[in-house]
Image (tube, rainbow, N blue to C red):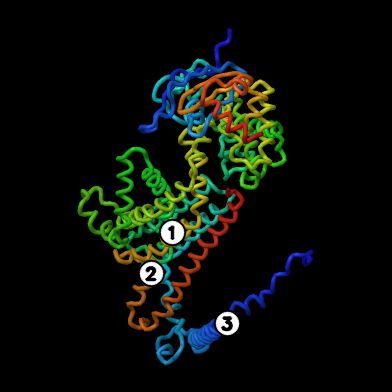
């Protein structure tokens, strides 16, 4: 019998990479092809985006240059970022955005978890809307159809996320209810909304709903669109939470009952916290989806970040440089999306101890 | 003359077409330790689950300290003093051990956080697991988890403890640490209703042994009589199987 007194030393990362990439003739060829392609793409991107690029804000110079025209982005940055919001009032959406991001950032910290954090975000949302709308404290009133750009994207996303969570929980619980009417209603709602494209829901909210409602009931178009996004998000999120609820064993409810916790306490203290922890990965995914779904509101003449970008590109002088503008806007979405991903990972790690 | 702490009178329970409990009656005096045994599917667990209303009954009645357990507000209040320990522990995995113990006293009995923590630590001492107060259930062995579950029930200051096969999900080397706690509890005068296959425990602490089969209570005996002079055919067969295993 051979003696083995020490654990085996794991191979270095260099050995592991090498053995993974050049294990056989097939993998070696694939590795080489991929590396060459990657080098070519990076090289081209570098030449176009940096080496040959111009940063002068002058479309004449750009039309002579083979590289990227970042001046197009510089020239259009206000309309891309703030949409049609009146010139000279731009500080209002920017301040609102800073308030909202600040509140969301604070609420995301464990010390503010729970109602305190929630109220901060709700207050920031209200402040944001008040700043955008104006009409108080000497602020010029600005109609909601002039709101736009990145602030609007953030406003709609945060509103839809915050508002759809309670609705989704209610729908998920309703779908598991003992009462057939409640169960059918929730199932019907979820499947109806999931079966229809978001664009259809937005169209309905923006154009059809006002025709059906009596004139006095016609809410602001922006509010209707925000509610449509919420309603759409809630249907999907409800299924995410239902999955979480199903993963919780019957014994948890029985133990809570044996300790004389009421049904409401059992839900609030035992069931929902566990379901929320179990659904962090799919919920993260869903919230990124909500962020990106807001770009569809451009269809109903609301100019969020993507809508404002399209509007900026209607200017014939700068239209040829749409790639540059799209890259910048994509980068903004990417940064926001990665922040959500990073936060989801943080939550997963934070709650990794309490697994069965 | 003390009135009995628990009266089960003519209880029937149906699951669809299946008659799970047939005319079950049992009276338990304060401080008594009752062991309920019988083959799988005989209705033992169902019976004790009816006592604290995890299951509803279809006929008959159950009185705890004279209060009918009928889902009325008074029954809900009385039920606070019935503790239960489950086969699968059913600790709350998202809470620490200490939080598991403090939850119900704070939210149901309305005691202060400080008081709840003091009670919780005292009960953890009692089951010899105080050092693990800050751990999560998932970080503990089955035996430790079950002792935490017993401590959690004791934090509600129960007058009756129900045990539903508390050692059946444990690895053999952990059975005794849980039984020791139960024996100690019995020694301190707790009224206990235990569904268990641990016949050694039954012989050591039970005042009476209840034998169930097919949803019926067939025998209620002292442990001595039950183990040495089982009366029914079925209890003899059951004991034959179970004692050979343990021999």
Q: Secondary structure at mark 3?
A: loop
Chain-order first, disc 1 or disc 2? 1
Image vertical order of residue A277 relative to residue A343, above or below: above
Disc assigned to residue A306: 2
Pointers 1 and 2 in contact (CB under 8 A)?
no
Residue wearing tag 1: A286
Chain of the residue displaying label 3: A
What's the residue at 50%, 68% (across, down)? Answer: A335
Chain-order first, disc 2 or disc 3? 3
Left or right: residue B210 versus residue A226 is right
Q: Crowding near pointer 2: few (<14 within 10 Å), some, many (20+)?
A: many
Tags 1 and 3 both on a single chain:
yes
Q: Crowding near pointer 1: few (<14 within 10 Å), some, many (20+)?
A: some
Tags 1 and 2 both on a single chain:
yes
Residue wearing tag 3: A24
Q: Secondary structure at mark 1?
A: helix
Give the mark toward the camera: 1 or 2.
1
Pointers 2 and 3 in contact (CB under 8 A)?
no
- Residue A59 position in % (x across, y down): 40, 86
- Cα distance in 3D space between marks 1 and 2: 19 Å
- Residue B35 position in % (x across, y down): 59, 25
- Cα distance in 3D space between marks 2 and 3: 46 Å
What's the residue at 47%, 27% (across, down)? Answer: B50
Q: Which image quadrant is residue A296 in? A: bottom left
């Amino acid at each position: 019998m051979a003696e083995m007194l020490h654990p085996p030393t794991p191979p270095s990362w260099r050995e592991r990479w090498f053995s993974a990439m050049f294990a056989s003739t097939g993998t070696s060829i694939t590795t080489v092809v991929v590396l060459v392609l990657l080098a070519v793409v990076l090289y081209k991107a570098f030449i176009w985006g940096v080496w040959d690029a111009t940063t002068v804000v002058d479309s004449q110079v750009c039309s002579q240059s083979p590289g990227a025209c970042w001046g197009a982005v510089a020239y259009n940055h206000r309309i891309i970022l703030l949409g049609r919001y009146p010139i000279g009032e731009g500080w209002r959406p920017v301040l609102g955005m800073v308030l909202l991001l600040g509140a969301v950032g604070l609420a995301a910290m464990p010390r503010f978890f729970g109602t305190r954090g929630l109220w901060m975000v709700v207050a920031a949302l209200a402040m944001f809307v008040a700043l955008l709308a104006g009409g108080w404290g000497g602020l010029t009133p600005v109609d909601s159809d002039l709101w736009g750009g990145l602030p609007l994207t953030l406003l709609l996303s945060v509103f839809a996320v915050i508002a759809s969570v309670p609705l989704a929980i209610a729908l998920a619980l309703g779908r598991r209810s003992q009462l057939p009417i409640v169960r059918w209603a929730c199932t019907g709602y979820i499947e109806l909304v999931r079966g229809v494209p978001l664009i259809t829901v937005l169209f309905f909210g923006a154009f059809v709903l006002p025709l059906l409602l009596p004139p006095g009931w016609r809410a602001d178009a922006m509010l209707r669109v925000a509610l449509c996004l919420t309603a759409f998000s809630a249907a999907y999120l409800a299924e995410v939470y239902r999955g979480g609820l199903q993963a919780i064993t019957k014994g948890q409810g029985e133990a809570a009952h044996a300790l004389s916790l009421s049904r409401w306490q059992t839900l609030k203290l035992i069931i929902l916290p566990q379901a929320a922890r179990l659904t962090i990965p799919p919920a993260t995914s869903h919230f990124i989806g909500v962020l990106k779904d807001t770009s569809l509101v451009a269809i109903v003449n609301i100019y969020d970040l993507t809508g404002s970008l399209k509007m900026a590109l209607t200017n014939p002088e700068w239209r040829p440089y749409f790639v540059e503008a799209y890259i910048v806007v994509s980068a903004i979405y990417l940064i926001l999306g990665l922040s959500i991903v990073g936060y989801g990972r943080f939550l997963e790690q934070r709650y990794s101890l309490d697994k069965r | 003359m003390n009135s009995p702490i628990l009266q089960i009178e003519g209880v029937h329970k149906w699951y669809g077409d299946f008659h799970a409990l047939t005319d079950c009656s049992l009276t338990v005096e304060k401080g008594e330790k009752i062991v309920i045994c019988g083959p799988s599917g005989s209705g033992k667990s169902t019976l004790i689950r009816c006592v604290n209303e995890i299951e509803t009954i279809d006929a008959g009645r159950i009185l705890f300290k004279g209060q009918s357990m009928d889902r009325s507000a008074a029954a809900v209040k009385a039920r606070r003093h019935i503790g239960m320990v489950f086969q699968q522990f059913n600790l709350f995995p998202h809470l620490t051990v200490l939080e598991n113990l403090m939850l119900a006293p704070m939210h149901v009995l309305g005691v202060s956080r400080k008081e709840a923590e003091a009670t919780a630590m005292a009960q953890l001492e009692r089951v010899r697991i105080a050092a693990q107060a800050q751990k999560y259930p998932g970080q503990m062995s089955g035996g430790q988890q079950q002792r935490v579950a017993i401590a959690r029930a004791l934090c509600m200051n129960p007058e009756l403890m129900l045990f539903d096969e508390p050692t059946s999900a444990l690895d053999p080397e952990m059975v005794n640490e849980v039984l020791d706690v139960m024996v100690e509890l019995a020694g301190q005068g707790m009224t206990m209703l235990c569904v268990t296959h641990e016949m050694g425990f039954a012989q050591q602490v039970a005042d009476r042994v209840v034998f169930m089969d097919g949803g019926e209570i067939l025998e209620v005996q002292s442990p001595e009589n039950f183990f040495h002079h089982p009366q029914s055919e079925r209890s003899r067969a059951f004991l034959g199987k179970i004692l050979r295993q343990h021999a």
